[in-house]
Structures are given as C-alpha cells and as structure tokens.
Image: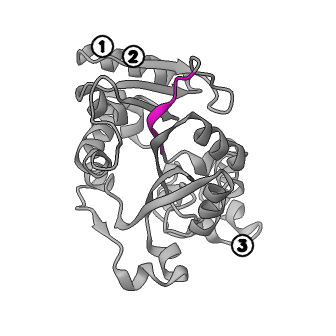
Amino acid sequence: MQERHENAGRYFDECARTCARYYLPWLKSRLAKPLGDACRVLEAGCDKGGNLKPFAEAGCRVVGIDLNAGALEAARELFEARGLEGVFLRADILEFAPPPNHLYDLIILRDVIEHVEDQPRLMARLAELLAPDGVLFVAYPPWRMPFGGHQQMAVSRFAAHCPWLHLLPGPLYPWALRLAGETPGKIAGLLEIRDTRISVRKFRRLAAGAGLRTVTERFFLINPHYEAKFGLKPRCLPRLLEVVPWLRDFFATTCFCLLQRQE
C-alpha cells in the first residue's frame, strides 16, 4: 500500500488538484447547466471526496457514495475542515435510490469500473441516474497498460514496480506474486482485478448496451493524475499509437470518456 493512500489529507488534495486542473475544465464546456447551485454532481466510488472538491467550490450540489465507511468519514471531515458542503452516503451504486425525479447533471466514475463485477448493470444504473441532458464522465485504465492490474498497490518493490506483470498467463501471475512475497489476501485482491478487467473495446460495448453514446474520448500516455503522484506532466497518447488498437491498449495509461443518453 502506498503511503499517499494512507494519508487521507494528502490523497484528498492530490485528487482535488488533478480534478481542478484536468477534469473540470474539460467537462465545464460540455455540461448543459453552468456550474453552480442548480448543477447536481454525483460521484460513484468517491473514496475520500477529493474529486468533488472543485465542484463544491464552484457551488454545485455534490453527492458522493462509496462502500468504505472510513473513507466517507474522512470525506466529511475534510470537507468540513475546508468549509465545503457535500453529502456523503454509504451505499452500493447498484442499489442507490435518490429522491424522486432527482437526476444528475454530471456523474463521475473514476478508476472504479475495473473493480466492479457486474459492469453491465453498473452502466445501466448510471444511465438511469443521469439527467436527459446530463454527462457521464468515466476514467479507467485499459487492462493491457503497464499497470492495468493495479500491481502498484503490491507490497513488494518488485511487484509494485514491474510493468505488465499482470499480463503473465494462467497461473504464472499468482506464482510470480507469491515469489515476490505477496500475502494470500493481496494476491486474491489482484486476481479479482484480473477477473473484472476492462478494455477499450469492452467499455464501448458496455456503454452502448446501457443506451449511452460516446461524446468524446481522450487517451493519455501519461495519466494526468501522475502529475500529483510522480511530478510527471500529462501527455496525450500520440495519434500513431491511438489509431492502432493493439498499441493503444498497451500504452494508454488512462482513458477519459464522456457519455450521454442516446436520443
């Protein structure tokens, strides 16, 4: 586990900084409503709420839901300490029921879908919660990218810093993790991510199946969040790599996708 994830304030501020610099400006021009009191923003899998901070500062009505009670408590405390208003609820997004006719102008799903088992149901539920002219922002790491298996969360330095380790076939991947000294619990968690992995092609199918159309996609060679994590300046995937699916899937460290309901 990286220290930055254990330090709630640090992780909150990193997410908020990335959102303010790279998500919010990109989304702002695509929202039907201007940012402010009338704009409703929901984040599914909000963790400690950092992504919602810039929207709360802009006056939006923000709601974050997550299954992690500790992360939600940290979110409430961090928002209160900064004089911000936000609602944080412990709930499963698949069962989440907002007040009647309470739909959202923007829904954020950042680095979450690759952890969810029932992805078709997830996308269908998000489509139901979206206002007719609302926007769904999804960011996800394509499975074949260097750290698409989230192995950076491993305890051993070898596993945490070994790109494409998760692409070892069959039983070789868990064998390598055991050899590196990972615990059975950590190995089970990493294998779960392999089971729920997401690719660009798969995500597009899921979106279409949920009645959503893609407004735009952006692929990054250097994930914008790497600026806060590693001091690396974000960089879009070169066009030559983007247009070749095999290369795109191996070198795009994240995909940003904006979706709306199909008319």
Helix, strand or loop status at disc 1: helix
Predominant SS along the magenta part: strand
- Pointer 2 or 3: first along the chain: 2
Residue assigned mark 2: 76
Residue type, numbered disc 3: Pro
Image spot of residue 73 (x, y percent): 45, 16
Query: Which region of the structure is painted magenta?
Result: 101-109
The image quarter containing residue 76 is top left
In the image, what residue type sits under mark 2?
Arg
Say whether marks 1 and 2 touch (CB < 8 Å). yes
Q: Would residue 22 be visible to someone looking at this image?
A: yes
Which residue was labeled with disc 3?
169
Q: Which residue is pictured at 32% across the width and 55% down the height?
A: 226
**Residue 46 appears in the figure:** no
Position of residue 88 in the picture relative to residue 13 (left or right) = right
Q: State the image coordinates of residue 232 (x, y, percent, origin top left).
A: 25, 60
Q: With respect to residue 81, does 169 lie above or below?
A: below
Residue drawn at x 66%, y 44% as measured from the top left:
124
| Labels 3 and 1: the sequence-earlier one | 1
